[in-house]
Image (cartoon, rainbow, N blue to C red):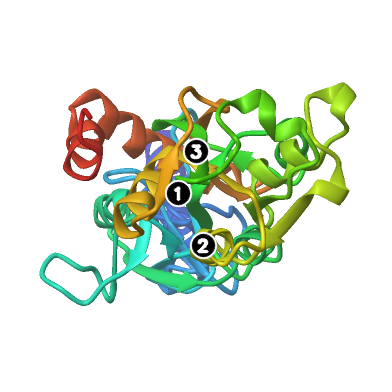
Amino acid sequence: MKKLKKLTALLLALVMVLALAACGGSGNSAGSGNANAGTEDSANTGNTNTGSTNADAGDSGDTAGEPAAFTTVEEGKLIMSTNAAFPPYEMVADGEGAYKGFEGIDVEIAAALAEKLGLELVIDDMDFDSALVAVQQGKSDMVLAGLTYREDRDEVMDFSTSYATGVQVVIVKDDSDITDMDALANDKMIGVQRGTTGEIYAADTPENGGYGEDHVRAYDNGALAVQALLNGQIDAVIIDNGPAKAYVDANPGLHLLDGDWVTEDYCLAVNEGNTALLNALNTELEAMIADGTVQSILDKYITAD
């Protein structure tokens, strides 16, 4: 009789264990692909916010120690704000090799990043300062526009690893009396691209190495600044070396002053605090730098001379 009671008790315990296991099997599992714990159905949507959520290849996004999932403005897309009047980094194009009407160093780097992340690149062309604002307002995922790192910009955006070095130079007319950098301080009118570090540095006070706001005129893009120089409305243009060479080659009667006006690092940037997306972009960008992909893109557009 005692043996029968023990057997009955064991059978009842086994039934209870099986019942509890069946009740607990419908919750989230570690392989659900959902970065936000506590929402049982979000794993099926692939979306934790209004934009799309993605994780690095092979990453569920919710395992301790692994990269967090990132969110983009539009599901399946990587939106890049830029100013496509800045050759050879970004420019409008319709020939062979153009990407959706654009080409240049930044365009090719962005296209490669989007492909590696499994996203479609969307290029949104606008004025340079508007491109910076777009990423801060969540209208674009990143800005790639020959963008240089500055501490004040770092307060409102997060910057990637530098992928290129930018050198700013000075363009003058062949018959100009400006023969060196020092001559720029002699009450000359200097053209720059609006929102760039060229404008910021040039418009600063003479005590800080600038020429003062009264001696700087900002234009929406470099092409307009160069046209103003050709028209005699300004005395010189300060702009990055790559675009400067392209403008000089395309416009007889212009040349570059000897020397570099300033040297800077080019980066891409995302909105302040968008750490997951920045980490994903940085991982792929650094891999492209390491394997020579970025250098091959630079060499394609910028020759040694």
Determine the secondary structure under disc 1: helix
Relative to the observer, which residue lies in front, 215 or 254? Answer: 254
Determine the secondary structure under disc 2: helix
Nearer mark to the viewer, of 2 and 3: 2
| Residue ID for mark 3 | 267
Which quadrant of the figure has residue 283? top left
Nearer mark to the viewer, of 2 and 1: 2
Write the residue at 50% across / 63% down.
83
Write the residue at 44% across / 33% down.
66
Write the residue at 71% across / 66% down.
137
Query: In this picture, is 110 found above or below 56?
Result: below
Write the residue at 28% across / 29% down.
289
Query: The C terminus is located in which quarter?
Result: top left
Query: The N terminus is located in which quarter?
Result: top left
**Label 2 Cα crowd, 10 Å radius (few <14 / some 14-19 / many 20+):** some
Q: Amino acid at mark 1?
A: Val
| Residue ID for mark 1 | 17
Residue 120 image offset from top left, x and y in percent: 31, 68
Determine the secondary structure under disc 3: strand
Q: CA distance from mark 2 to mark 1?
A: 86 Å
Residue 61 image offset from top left, x and y in percent: 44, 46
Q: CA distance from mark 2 to mark 3?
A: 31 Å
Query: In this picture, is 102 found above or below 226?
Result: below
Query: In this picture, is 46 found above or below 9?
Result: below
Q: Is residue 172 left or right of residue 205?
A: left
Q: CA distance from mark 3 to mark 1?
A: 58 Å
